[in-house]
Structures are given as C-alpha cells and as structure tokens.
Image (tube, grey):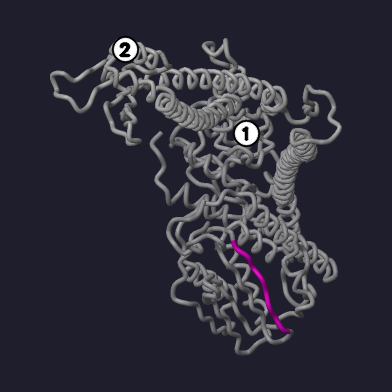
Amino acid sequence: MATSKILLVEDNQDDVELTQYAFRASQVNNELDVVRDGEEALEYLFGVGRHTGRRSCERPALVLLDLKLPGIGGLDVLRSMRARPETRRIPVVILTTSDDQSDVVNGYDLGVNSYIRKPVAFHDFSSLVEQLGLYWLVTNTAPPA
Amino acid sequence: MSQTDKGIPCGGPVAVAGSEAFGTSGSFGARGDRPADGASLHPYLRHGIGVRLLMAIILFSGFVTLLSTLTQLYLDYLTEMRLMRDRFGEIETSSLASLGGSLWSLDTDQLRLQAEGIKRLPDIQYVEIRELGRSTERRLLVAVGEAGVQPLLANDYHIIHGEAGGGTRSIGVLHVEASLSGMYGRLIGRAVVILVSQGVKTFLVALFILYIVHRLVTRHLAAIAEHVGRYRFGMAAPLVLDRPPQRHEDELDRVVGAFNAMSAGIDGAYLHLSEVNAELANDIAARIKAEEEVRRLNAHLEQRVQQRTAELEASNRELDAFTYSVSHDLRAPLRRIEGFGQLLNAEAGERLDEQCRHYLERIRAGTREMAEMTESFLKLARSSRSDLIMEPANLADLAAKVITRLREREPDRIVSVHIAPAMPVTGDRRLLDIALENLLGNSWKYTRPREAATIAFAPEVVDGVTRYVIRDNGVGFDMAHVNRLFTPFNRLHRPGEFEGTGIGLATVQRIITRHGGRIWAEGTVNQGATFSFTLWEGSADNGNLENPPG
C-alpha cells in the first residue's frame, strides 16, 4: 500500500468535523481526506473529474463510507468500487446512523468489510474511531497494492 | 296421463299437483284415442251396460218363454189325449152294435165299409175286425189301414151279439189303432209358433228397453265420463246433461249435482292451493332476492373491509416508516449536539464557570435521553415492521443472557433470579430478545428499592395453554392503571423515580402479538408485578414445537 490515507465519504460538515476531531484525539495519525458525495468519492478513487491526475498509488488504505449521500449513494459507491479491480480490495467500513436491516444485508452482499453504526455519545464515537483506525491500519494486514 | 299410470285408484284423493288430466274409467272407454275398429259401434254399446241388460233380458225371457211353452204343450197334450179317448168311446158306442149285426151275418163287405168308416175318423190309422169262436182257417178278418206304425194308441173292443134268450156273447174283436204323430206334429207346430213369437217379442222388448236405458241412463253416464275425462282444474264448466229438465230430481241429477259440488270444492281447494303456491313462489322469489341482496352487501362489506384493512395496513406501514425515519434522522443532529457539547466541554470546560458547565451538562443529558427515546422508537417500529424470522428459540437462554447484561450494567446489585431450565419456543429471536429485555429489565428496574430482590421466569400450563410468567417482588403497580401499561408513552411512575421512555411494554405487546400470543399484567402496589404472556395461542402446538405455524 503506497499511502496510508483514510478517505471519509461524508456529506454533513458537522459530522466531518466531529470525525476529524475524533481522529485527531486518537492515536491514529493517518491523513484523512474528505469527499462530500458519492460522485466525488468515485472521482477521487479513479482519478477522474475533479481528481484528474490523482495517481493510483495515492489510493486510500481505508474508506469510511456514509450511506446517505446526495446523488450517488454509499451502497452505489461500494458497488462501483467492488466492480473495478483497482479498488476491489480496499477495505471499506460503512459508518452510518442507519441500522436498517436491508442496509446491513446489502452492504455485506456488496462486499463491505465492516458495518458500524455511529453511537450518539461522542465519547463512545471517539473510542470507536480509534479502535477502527488501529484495527484496519495497524492490526489488519492490508491487501497488496 | 291416465289414472292407472299414476297409480291413483279411481275415486281416490286427487292430487292438485298432478292436475294435467283425469283419466277415464276403462269401462266407458271415452278416450280420445278410440280404436279404429270400433268405429261402427260405440264401445259402450258393445261392452256397455245396455248390451248386458239386453243379454240378461233375453236369457231370462227365453227361460220364462220356454217354461210357459212347455206348460202349454203339456196341457195341449192332455187335451189331445182326452179327445183321442173320446173318439175311441164314440167308436165304441156308435159302431159296435152295427158291427155285431154285420159280423153275425158275416157280411164282409158291410164290415169293410164300416171299418173304412171308422178309419176315416181323424188320426185312426188301422182298423181290424176279427171273428171269434170258429176255427182259425174259417175265421173272418177284415183289416183296413197300416198296422203298427209308431207312435200309436191301440184299443180292442168285443163285438157282442144278443142271444134270443136274452143273453149275450162275444163274437168278435174290433182292434183300432190311432196314430199319435199327427198330434205330435200339431204340438210341435204350436210350440214353434209360441217360441218364435215369444222370442221376437222378447227381442223387440229388449231392444226397446236397451233404447230406453241408453236414452235415459247410459248416454248420460257416457257424457258424465267424458266430462270427467276432460275435467281441468279451475276451468271446468259445470256438468250439464243433455235432457229436458226433470220435474223431480232423479239419480242422474243427484250424480250431476254431487259431481258439480265436488268439482266446485276441488276447484276451490285448487284455487286456494294455487294462491298459496303463488304466495310461496312470491315468498321464495323475495327470499332469493333478499339472499342476493345479503350476498351483494356481504361482498360489498368484504370489499370495504379489505379496502379498510389495506388502508389501515398502509397507514400503519406509513406510520412505522415515519417513526423509523424520524427516529433515525433525529439521531444525526443529536449526535452532533452531543458531540459538539463534548467538544465544548473538552476545549473550554475549564474556562466556563460552574453554572455554565451545569448548563452544558444538562444539554448533553437531554440529548442522551432523547437518543434513548429515539432508540426505543426504533425498536418499537422495528418490532412491527420487520419480517419475522422464525426459528427455534429457548426463552430460558435468551432470558439468561438478558440477566447477564443487566448484571454487567449494575454489578453492585444483588438480585435473586430464577429461570426455568428450558422454555423452547418458535419465534424471531431478535424480537423475543427485545421483549425479554424489556420485561426482565422492568423487573430489574422496579426491584431496585428491594434489598432482597427476586425475579422468577417460568412456564405455567393453564387449560392446555402454556403461559410464560415473569414475577418480581418490586414496587408493583395499581391495578386501576393496568390498562395504561401497554400504551406507548404511558408511565406509571414519575421520571425521577425510574428511568424509561414508556415505550417498552408497547413494544413487548407488539412482539407478543406478532407471535400469535397475548400479554397481561397483574400487580399490587409495593407487592410486586407479574407479567404473563402466551405464544401461538390457538394453534395446536402452542409454539412449542419446531415447526412454526404459518
């Protein structure tokens, strides 16, 4: 893995800030890139559109994916990623407020690596973000580039 | 259709239903399909009463005629025989004296003349005069006529000659034979005349009687028979015979009267029955119409019910979706309030004074409470929204896990929990877990003031139905408020006393209902509460077997 970036796909600025804060407060120091919708996420991942010129070696080591996004939804982003060989193996964690059974089932069917429902209490969220980063970026063996 | 076909005896009760026709009695034969060979003579003339009457008259009259003829013949015979004997007596008185003289003088010619004179008398067929006293060779014999032709009547007379001395002696015999065939012929002729005249008379009288009987009786009987044969209910004109009105009512008039009265009665009964039948038909038609109306209304009602059910289901689904969506969407802003509150506390907590920190803490507590509430909403919505995943489950295991979680949450509490070893059921484990979490959580919560808290969970079988009973010795509740227990947002305790959203038991009830069961509660203030529920009530296996119903 060329980079150890984390890509956060999240449309709400407040949630972005909270997540960024949680990461800052944690032991995970990896760079956090943020895109605000599904379309930009795909452009970022495939180096097209607004992210033309982004090299394949700059692909993230972990994608934190919200499901409720304007335009292309989180599950569609996941489907497109799993359909392309260059993004097929990137670990994706769905990080959302939904615990709808169909979302869970569809997420796993499309090959998500983890499904996490954001807790309300910020303290819980912070510790969860830390666990997440440590697990996927340190504990877990990443797929080869 | 004839009566015999229908098996109804003549003169038997007449069924109105079979009112097509009356058959005719066979002796009259007044049927429309009269056989062609009887065209020359009306059947009732050939086989009718008249002919039998004729035969009876002829037989009886013949017998009487025969008897009277025989009597007449016998009397005639006696008369003839007396005449015959008179004739013989006449011969004796008139001829014997002269014959004696002739014989004495042996005058043969005179004797022959006298013999022929006798023979000329009626019926005399043979006269013989024979002399007595001399030798056979010289004996005188005069014979006239043919002797011995039967039948005959013969008589011998002695011819007497007066002696000079006054004595008498027989000098000869006069033999006379009279033929009876003439007399018989006369008798036979007379008998024939009598018989023939009597026979003709008898036949003529009989014919006359036949005509009279036909005229007076049988043609009317035939007319009656024909009328009865044509008889139809409700339309028969009264029976009228084709004859001049009688001064006094006779038997036929009585028959006609009786028949007309009877047919009038039958017509009346028939009319009545027809009316009743018509009424019945009307009733039936009305009933059929009413039934159709009921069916139509039922179908309409069913359609309405289905429509309403569909509407209700749709609105329920919408409501659940709304609840779910709202709870769900509320979580995101809640998270932000809580999160930024936390950040504020972390970044600027030390700079805030006591009062401001308290406000901040209240904000965060409010958000947590609201988060808890939305979580309950989600569970409530999910309990009625999600599809049931039916699988075997053990309520004892689920309950034990719930208790374990509760103990982890409050490790300091000492609660004596007794759970029956095994309660196998069929159901959705996730929902059953939510239900038990609420029920046992309530027990856990409301026994908090007890130093020796006890919770028991065990099955009981009442009337063949298994009920699962959770008992605690907690604060209980007033039975007056039992109906409010299962209504959402209804809490029997002040918020400060016990935590909770007031949605738990409503959720439990939905889950139990979806599992085909009922739930009810009993309690006493400060004595404890008992919650009982059933699963798959009404189904044969009571939810205890591995194959779930439906």
Q: Chain of mark 1?
A: A
Q: Tell me the kind of residue under disc 1.
A: Gly
Name the side, left or right, on which B4 lies relative to B237.
Answer: left
Dot 2 crowding, Cα within 10 Å, few <14, some 14–19, many 20+: many
Up-down: is B231 above or below B336? above
Q: Chain of mark 2?
A: B
Residue drawn at x 62%, y 33% as measured from the top left: A73
Quadrant of the image containing the N terminus of chain B: top right
State the extent of the magenta-drawn residues as a range.
B517-524
Nearest the viewer among B117 and B377 is: B117
Name the side, left or right, on which A26 lies relative to B136.
Answer: right
Residue drawn at x 60%, y 16% as measured from the top left: B42
Dot 1 crowding, Cα within 10 Å, few <14, some 14–19, many 20+: some
Q: Quadrant of residue B113?
A: top left
Q: Nearer the viewer, mark 2 or mark 1?
A: 2
Secondary element under disc 1, as helix, strand or loop, is: loop
Residue drawn at x 48%, y 55% as measured from the top left: B548
Nearest the viewer among B57 and B314 is: B57
Tell which residue pokes out farthest to the front in this image: B165
The dot on residue B506 is: none
Nearest the viewer among B240 and A132 is: B240
Secondary element under disc 2, as helix, strand or loop, is: helix
Label 2: which residue?
Answer: B112
Residue B286 in sight: no
Q: Is residue B234 magenta?
A: no
Label 1: which residue?
Answer: A73
Q: Tell me the kind of residue under disc 2.
A: Arg
Q: How far across and down, in percent of the image, does residue A10 sit? A: 65, 39
Q: How far across and down, in percent of the image, does residue B195 sit? A: 51, 21
Q: Are marks 2 and 1 on the same chain?
A: no
Q: In the rendered structure, are the residues bearing label 2 and label 1 in contact, judged by CB atoms less than 8 Å apart?
A: no
Residue drawn at x 58%, y 67% as measured from the top left: B534
